Image: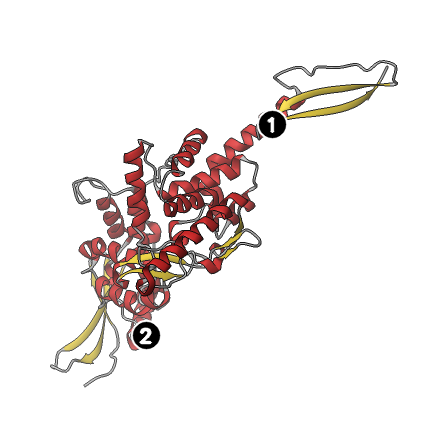
Amino acid sequence: MGGIFLATITRRGDGYRIRVSSGYSIDGKQIVHSMTWHPEPGMTPRQIEKAVSRAAIEFEERCKGGMIGGNIKFQIYAEKWLREYAEPNLRTRTVDRYKQLAKRAYIAIGGLHLEKITPAVMQGFVDNLQETGIKRGGGKLSPKSVREHLSFVSTVLESAVRLNMIKDNPCRRVSLPTLKQKERDIYSLEETQRFLELLKKEPLTYRLFFTLALFGGFRKGELLGLEWQDINFDSNIISVRRSSLYSPTRGGTFTDGVKTKESARSLKMPNSIFDLLREYRTWQNAERLKLGDRWQSTDRLFTGWDGRPMATSTPMHWLYAFFKRTGMRRVTIHSFRHENASLLINSGADVKTVSSALGHSETSTTLNIYAHSFQEAQAKASQAVANVLNFKKKRAKIKVIPKTKSRKIAYSAPSIYGRTHALHLKIKAK
């Protein structure tokens, strides 16, 4: 026996339960779908009657179309969404992260039907994530991590909204913890110079890797994905076309496309970088000849001993051993990307140039990440203008040239690039 029966409406407390039967299962049990509807504050009895009737009709239509959120639990739906949508369409690392975030979400709301997940439920979930002890080891989750957990749930529920399984995404009305802007931990100019000096004594592989990280602002995965076909020795251009990443679901290291469309970029580098690249290519060719048939030809710049792509954790392990050996202050590999951006900004590069060099998809991303650096550069520029125009600092040293109909004023002021610029003006003699 099957078919859709008319919806029934029952008053329950301050709300209304709407039930629709869609026939019987194989074992003879009636299949019933239900939802609860609550009137808006201030509605008249007549308005309530019309609204609940409309809600019942809409729910009945959803049942007919198979779009029944009431009988689908969050975990079941989320696993189906990950399997049927996320895995075929999203980047591997994104899916891996979603699966990590899903673990806490399943514990908190996995057993709830989609329609039972209200803004109050989601606010409770977010509040719980901020409690001490939620993290392994007894600590708290960072505001960023809390936001990521909510973002995962919201993404799943948004797909249910699009399918008319639920009317609204409750995550939209949740209060989130404030993100604290961290000061980016990068080297000073003096520390950078010392780092490069110490790097000269290190193995050629890591000397090249971290020199490129600093001079090019490349992401770690972009560096590990570089192949010799990406290096143009005639024009001194390095092109970013792929990334080398790690995923347990992919069995370890794998090759992926670049992070965004704008991440595929070409950068012109100094002659000194290409001299180092030539030296490294000669060394790698010698290693390849030594190994003979044991060398796995991948065309990668950075490889393991046998030519296969270098493991994504190798540069970090080497760097931390370098810090311990030399006593240099410990920073992350990504710090060199931030330092490259900071140097570009302080050299006077505009936001579009910096954004393009870093491969950001939007200049707003660059401005958000490096707002403080741009503010500092702008302040230096303003001070340089003030120095030139003599608003607060030195008075201009005036030199009067006799026997002419004009006088020549000459004075100098420091620029934001560390050079001194001589400025000359001519004025009429009185």
Q: Determine whether the residue tagged by mark 2 lies in a helix, strand or loop.
A: helix
* Residue placed furthest toward the left: 27
Question: In the rendered structure, which amino acid carries the disc numbered 2?
Answer: Glu
Q: Quadrant for residue 108, please give it.
A: bottom left
Residue pointed to by mark 1: 419
Q: Position of residue 209 (x, y in %)?
A: 40, 47
Residue 242 drawn above or below residue 387: below
* Left or right: 356 in relation to 401: left
User: Considering depth in this image, is 351 or 300 the residue closer to the camera?
Assistant: 300
Q: Quadrant for residue 331, please give it.
A: top left
Q: Position of residue 344 (x, y in %)?
A: 52, 39
First-in-chain label (2 vs 1)? 2
Q: Position of residue 44 (x, y in %)?
A: 33, 57
Choose mark 2 or mark 1, whichever is in front.
1
Q: CA distance from mark 2 to mark 1?
A: 74 Å
Query: Which quadrant of the rendered structure holds the C terminus?
Result: top right
Residue at the image position 74 percent from the left and 15 percent from the top: 398
Residue at the image position 18 percent from the left and 86 percent from the top: 1
Crowdedness near tag 1: few (<14), some (14–19) or many (≥20) residues, C-alpha within 10 Å = few
Q: Position of residue 334 (x, y in %)?
A: 38, 44
Q: How is the image coloured?
A: secondary structure
* Left or right: 163 in relation to 273: left
Q: Determine whether the residue tagged by mark 1 lies in a helix, strand or loop.
A: loop
* Residue placed furthest toward the front: 290
Q: Quadrant for residue 311, please give it.
A: bottom left
Residue 257 drawn above or below residue 31: above
Whether residue 155 is visible to the viewer of this picture, yes or no, is no
Residue pointed to by mark 2: 61
Question: In the rendered structure, which amino acid carries the disc numbered 1?
Answer: Arg
